[in-house]
Image: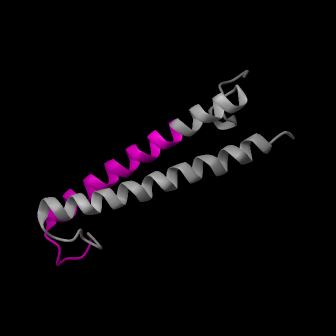
Amino acid sequence: MAKGDGSKVWSIFSLAAALGAAAATRKGIDKSWQVSTGKKPPENPADPDIDLWEAVAWAAVTGAAVSLARMYAQRRAASYYVKSTGKLPPPLRRDGE
């Protein structure tokens, strides 16, 4: 593997994991919102026709859940990378590694 190739592989792998996790989480949140509130989730929380409490709740729930899912997916991807290559992905390496 040429120098820098690992970084490209990691970037693609990490991005795919994060996007997949975000998409799956968003679908789950949409469904959960609909079941718990009986309404469709707000398409645009900035819309003045959406109640403020609903917009704030939607933004908080989706922001936290998607961020956590992306972080978890990237950690799992890093773990798989370590198992495959024996070392941390280039962006996660500490000085001297």
The foreground one among 23 and 46 is 23
Q: Residue at x 29, y 73 (%)?
A: 43
* Residue farthest along the top direction in this orientation: 96
Q: Is residue 39 left or right of residue 92?
A: left
Tell me residue 30's x, y (percent).
28, 63
Tell me residue 53's x, y (percent).
13, 61
Chief secondary structure of the magenta portion:
helix
Protein image colouring: one colour
Taking the magenta stretch, the answer to whether it contains residue 62 is yes
* Residue farthest along the bottom direction in this orientation: 49
Q: Is residue 45 left or right of residue 38?
A: right
Tell me the quadrant of the picture where the N terminus can be found.
top right
* Residue farthest along the right direction in this orientation: 2
Tell me residue 76's x, y (percent).
52, 37
Q: Residue at x 29, y 57 (%)?
A: 29
Q: Residue at x 26, y 62 (%)?
A: 31
Tell me residue 36's x, y (percent).
14, 59
Range shown magenta: 46-75
The foreground one among 50 and 14 is 14
Q: Residue at x 62, y 33 (%)?
A: 92
The foreground one among 74 and 57 is 74
How many numbered tags mark residues here?
Answer: 0
Tell me the quadrant of the picture where the C terminus can be found.
top right
Q: Is residue 49 left or right of residue 95?
A: left
* Residue 70 drawn above or below residue 57: above
* Residue 64 drawn above or below residue 76: below
